[in-house]
Image (cartoon, grey):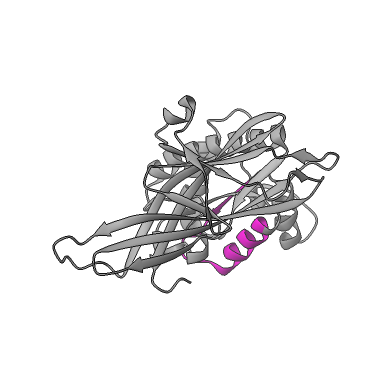
Amino acid sequence: MPFDASFEDTYKLGIKGAVSEFGDMIAERVDDQMYQEGILERIYRQIEIADIVIADMTGQNPNVFYEVGYAHAKGKLCILLTSDADDIPFDLKHRRHIVYNSSITTLRRELVKELEWARDELEKQRASHIKVTPQSFEGLLKRDRWHASGEVTFKIDLDNTSNDRAVSIQALYFYSTKAWILYQDDKECPSTAPDAGVAKSGWEKRHFLQPPLPWLQKGAWAQVKFTAERTLEFAYKGEELKDSYEIRGRSLLRVVTPEGNFDYEIPINVTVNEVPF
């Protein structure tokens, strides 16, 4: 965040207040620390050693944007904050973010939830040795006279975070509501009802995805790519269909390895247009 007095309550009451509810976390900003190197070198080094990076995008500060890009390039878990939803760039809309509308109470409450997610995510990475990172989604709107449907292209990175072992990916499952049909390599993905444990969380359909590789060697990366389609609106009585639609929600990716099943929540926030961008 900018080093500006207007962010003091955000930092001290909102962020540090939320982190204080966890006994195994500490939140620091470089102006809290003593160091000898230059401030920029300190910022980048602290990003490199952090488990979680929290960034306030309010005001679209270019330094903050650059540091968030650096954190993403380093593969860090990032939680983005903003007082105004318009401050989150299009390319980051699908990333986890909190819109707190200048309310420190809202920020603290929602950040506690996100930190619980981040801690669970770190534990899964350490247990499975696989880091799951959704990349930018692309949305395409298809319309005729009677209905509109949306197609969302997913690209999800799988990284082996282990430096000393290969990891076997035995299966990938994507969970959704009933309305979605998935395609991989232009073929419809097999689907069935979800297992009982996942169904309790509201998922209605389980799709099988072909893993990009059977093994991820130590430090290796692979990407699973697929499209999901669903009907968005019907025009039975001549209603005017929209030029674009917002699709928001969440889905679940299950990675099956010899160590067990590991579930990763995939947030979805994408606009579908007739001309994707």
Residue extending furthest left? 237
Is 271 situated above or below 54?
A: below
Q: Quadrant of the N terminus?
A: bottom right
Q: Is residue 18 magenta?
A: no
Please give the name of the residue rendered at 72% of the width and 48% of the height, measured from the top-left corner: 213
Q: Nearer the viewer, residue 100 or 253?
A: 253
Residue extending furthest top? 196
Residue 75, position in %: x, y? 68, 52
Please give the name of the residue rendered at 52% of the width and 60% of the height, measured from the top-left corner: 4
Q: Nearer the viewer, residue 31 or 27?
A: 27
Residue 35, position in %: x, y? 77, 51
Please give the name of the residue rendered at 42% of the width and 36% of the height, measured from the top-left corner: 203
Residue 117, position in %: x, y? 54, 37
Residue 119, position in %: x, y? 60, 35
Number of marks in the image?
Answer: 0
Question: Magenta region: which residues?
Answer: 51-72
Q: In the image, is 276 to the left or to the right of 253?
A: left
Residue extending furthest bottom? 275
Q: Nearer the viewer, residue 47 or 143?
A: 143
User: Hey, which quadrant is residue 118 in on the image?
Assistant: top right
Q: Nearer the viewer, residue 7 or 149?
A: 149
User: Hey, which quadrant is residue 184 in on the image?
Assistant: bottom right
